[in-house]
Image (cartoon, helix red, strand yellow):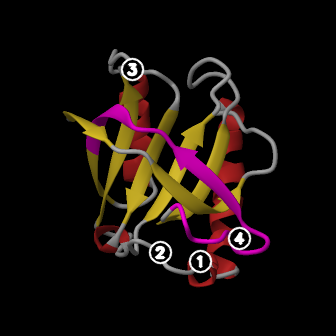
């Protein structure tokens, strides 16, 4: 795990209606459903002038910590001048410091395991904007790699 600073950026994509929670696997259901919609509606193809082929899954608007409700967003990075396509939402991520947590293994088990380790790790979290970045390394779900960015001071 390394500590890094990232500049702010803008995403276009889908926002979960309302908030979700980690209780009773509700976030797994809600976030999974949003991913299905993101993929079945081919949302990345609707986003013009993407800055990369990466997909961001963002956890934000935490009411307290990982035990309380939070918002969820899936999207792709666009610049400030790109018009937002109809039917999509935007999310602006501010410049922040992060702990970068590399994840590798069989999806979605490796992702669940990584988050469970983060929750008990004792790292000082800001609970502002945390996100996962999916790229070419994460396409093979039997041997996926991705990075989780945990907001910190």
Using the rendered view, name the quadrant where residue 71 is placed: top right
Horizontal side of 82 relative to 40 (left or right) equals left
What span is in magenta?
80-101
**Badge count:** 4
**Label 4 vs label 3: CA separation?**
31 Å
Q: Nearer the viewer, mark 4 or mark 1?
A: 1
Which residue bears the numbered disc 4?
37
Q: Is residue 84 above or below residue 23?
A: below
The quadrant of the image that shows the N terminus is top left
Which residue bears the numbered disc 2?
50
Which residue bears the numbered disc 1?
47
Q: Earlier in the sequence, mark 2 or mark 3?
A: 2
**Label 4 vs label 2: CA separation?**
19 Å
Callout 3 environment at 10 Å: few (<14), some (14 to 19), or many (20+)?
few
Q: Earlier in the sequence, mark 4 or mark 3?
A: 4
Which residue bears the numbered disc 3?
120
Question: Please, what secondary structure does the residue beneath circle 2 have?
Answer: loop
């Amino acid at each position: 795990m390394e500590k890094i600073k990232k500049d702010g950026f803008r995403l276009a994509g889908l926002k979960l209606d309302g908030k979700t929670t980690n209780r009773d696997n509700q976030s797994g259901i809600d976030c999974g459903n949003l991913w299905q919609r993101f993929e079945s509606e081919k949302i990345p193809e609707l986003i013009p002038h993407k800055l990369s082929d990466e997909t961001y899954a963002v956890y934000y608007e935490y009411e307290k910590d990982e035990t309380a409700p939070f918002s969820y967003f899936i999207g792709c990075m666009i610049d400030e001048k790109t018009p937002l396509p109809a039917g999509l939402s935007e999310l602006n991520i501010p410049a922040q410091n992060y702990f970068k947590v590399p994840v590798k293994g069989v999806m979605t088990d490796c992702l669940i395991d990584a988050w469970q380790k983060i929750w008990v790790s004792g790292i000082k979290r800001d609970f502002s904007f945390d996100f996962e970045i999916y790229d070419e390394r994460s396409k093979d779900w039997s041997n996926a790699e991705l990075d989780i960015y945990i907001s910190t001071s």
